[in-house]
Image: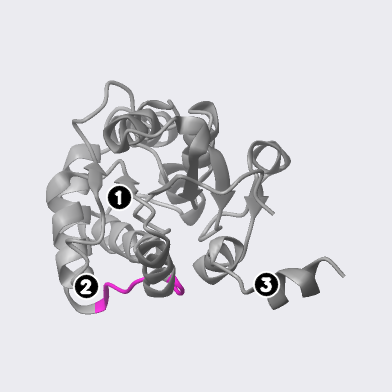
Amino acid sequence: MLPCPPAAVVFDMDGLLFDTEALYARAIMSAATELGCGMTTELFHRFVGTPWQENRRQMILHYGEAYPADELRVAWIRHFDVLAAAELELKAGAVELLATLDQLGLPRAIATSSSHATVRHHLSAHDLSTRFHEIVAQGDYASAKPAPDPFLKAAERLKVDPRDCLALEDSLNGVRSASAAGMMTIMVPDLIQPTDEIRGLCTLVVASLHDVRELIAPRSPAEIDATHR
């Protein structure tokens, strides 16, 4: 159970709302092969939920100053765009959860490290452009995740106290960000499982957005009575 009913819900995007992290993984491996440079799954996992400048720093630390990080980024995005055009899918339970939020009249936002253009593209691809009240994306905050800024900005725009917001995340840095903002935080793991540290920061860890919906969906008196027997 949640500590209290949320007054608003703030979604991460990549890996939480859209099944994009696996596409990013495939794209970066293809880009590295194209350029003839190194890349490993282990290193890619460090990039999840992390802004580009930190990812670039990790690449240089791992492979050295001669590593073509900027060229890789260009190729990575190009390969991702090709994959996303054909294979971009919503995560299981996303549509059902949004329908429940509509039913409850709960405001919602996206807080992401991606660009506004990427958010618009992904939402439009699945006809979700009008389903979120606010979009907080790259350029809207001073410091990226794991700093709390993206989630604090989302709460500010929704005009809801962060403590009354439910944050939904799939990445370790995303959980750190939402928790630091003071939000109730649910992790829905995607490529990376929670560590002991992350479990300590989460209100709950669940398997899918279907589980999130079950937590907040309105229930009949009979269902409530059955729960407390």
For disc 3, the marked residue is 221
Look at the magenta stretch and give its main secondary structure. loop
Q: Is residue 208 visible?
A: yes
Observer able to see residue 68:
no
**Closest to the observer, 58 or 134:** 134
Mark 2 and mark 3 residues within 8 Å of each other at the beta carbon: no
Q: Secondary structure at mark 2?
A: loop
Residue drawn at point x = 51 percent, y = 61 percent: 190
Q: Nearer the viewer, mark 2 or mark 3?
A: 3
Amino acid type, label 2 = His
Farthest residue, direction front? 221
Q: Position of residue 186 (x, y in %)?
A: 57, 50
Please report the bounds of the magenta region as a residue range. 87-93
Marker disc for residue 126: 2
User: How dense is the environment of label 1, judged by Cα within 10 Å: few (below 14), some, or many (20 and up)?
Assistant: some
Quadrant of the frame with the C terminus: bottom right
**Rounded to the nearest whole Å, what is the CA distance between mark 1 and mark 3?**
60 Å
Residue 223 lies left or right of residue 109; in this view the side is right
Q: Please identify, in this view, whether the residue under mark 2 or under mark 1 is nearer the observer.
A: 2
Task: Using residue 32 as the reference point, say whether residue 4 is left or right of it.
Answer: right
Quick check: is 129 in the magenta stretch? no
Mark with earlier residue (2, 1): 1
| Label of residue 37 in the image | 1
Indicate the amino acid at tag 3.
Pro
Q: Are marks 1 and 3 in contact (CB under 8 Å)?
A: no
Where, by quadrant of the figure, is residue 89 drawn?
bottom left
